[in-house]
Image (cartoon, helix red, strand yellow):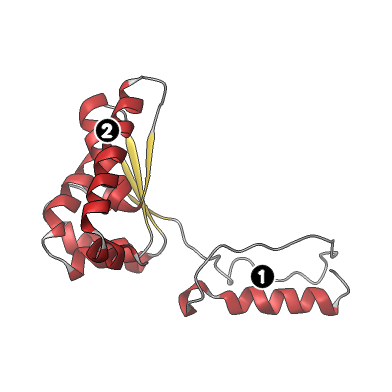
Amino acid sequence: GEMQSYVKSAPLSVLRFFLSFKSEAIRLAESGEFDLIWAHWWIPGGWVGAKAVAKSGCPMVVTCHGTDIHMLNAYPLLQRTGSRVFAAAERITVVSSFLKDSLVASIGERVNNISDRILVAPMPIDTDVFSFDENTRPESGSIITASRLTKQKNLNVLIHAAKRLMSDGVS
């Protein structure tokens, strides 16, 4: 979520990173040791992956979360590069239908059949599908979350679950 501010503050460092990332990814993809390139975020991973796909023919999956798709709307100059990335992808995963619709609206006219290649893999979990079961027996263990403290992460659900576990004597 902070990538664009870092790019603005250290553009030469970012450029050096992109170029070394690209050359190493191409080298690895051309080695033939891999069946798939997975790019987490369309930029920088997808940009690098698209370059590796062009050199190796290895298929690529691109995963987008939010900020990376928002950047396509906030910075229209990125749409051309984004279009090349998504055109190179066999599959694209996004974490919500909203993001799928946003991606299609941003570059759908530039990338053939993009909507058909997008799979929505929701994050966080759908609480209408996954809910507390009174018959589940508590067990000891740990809960780990790696996320930013923002409303859309629904960490309140995790906090309430931890509180319930503690009140049930699970530590």
Please state if 37 lies on the left or on the right of 54 as rendered. right
* Mark 2, secondary structure of its residue: helix
In three-dimensional space, the C-alpha distance between marks 2 and 1, rounded to whole angstroms, equals: 45 Å
Q: Residues within 10 Å of mark 1 (few under 14, many from 20)?
A: few
Q: Residue furthest toward the right?
A: 169
Q: Position of residue 27 (x, y in %)?
A: 31, 26
Camera sees residue 85: yes
What x and y, as percent, mark residue 121? Answer: 45, 56
Left or right for 12, reference 38: left
State the SS at label 1: loop
For this rendering, which residue is in front, 164 or 67? 67
The crowding category of the residue bearing disc 2, from other C-alpha atoms within 10 Å (few below 14, some 14 to 19, many at least 20), is some
Q: Is residue 111 visible?
A: no
| Quadrant of the rendering where the N terminus is positioned | bottom left
Q: Quadrant of residue 18?
A: top left
Nearer the observer, 57 or 147: 147
Q: Residue at x 79, y 60 (%)?
A: 141
Q: Where, by quadrant of the figure, is residue 10 drawn? A: bottom left
Amino acid at dot 1? Ser
Q: Residue furthest top?
A: 32
Q: Which residue is mark 1?
A: 131
Apparent side of residue 153 relative to residue 64 in the rendered image (left or right): right
Q: Earlier in the sequence, mark 2 or mark 1?
A: 2
Residue 85 is situated, as x and y percent measured from the top left of the image, at 22, 46
Q: Residue at x 30, y 61 (%)?
A: 68
Image position, residue 90 (x, y; %): 30, 39
Please name the amino acid that badge 2 sits on.
Ser
Q: Which mark is residue 23?
A: 2
Asked if disc 2 and disc 1 are in contact, CB closer than 8 Å, the reply is: no
| Count of numbered labels shown in the rendering | 2
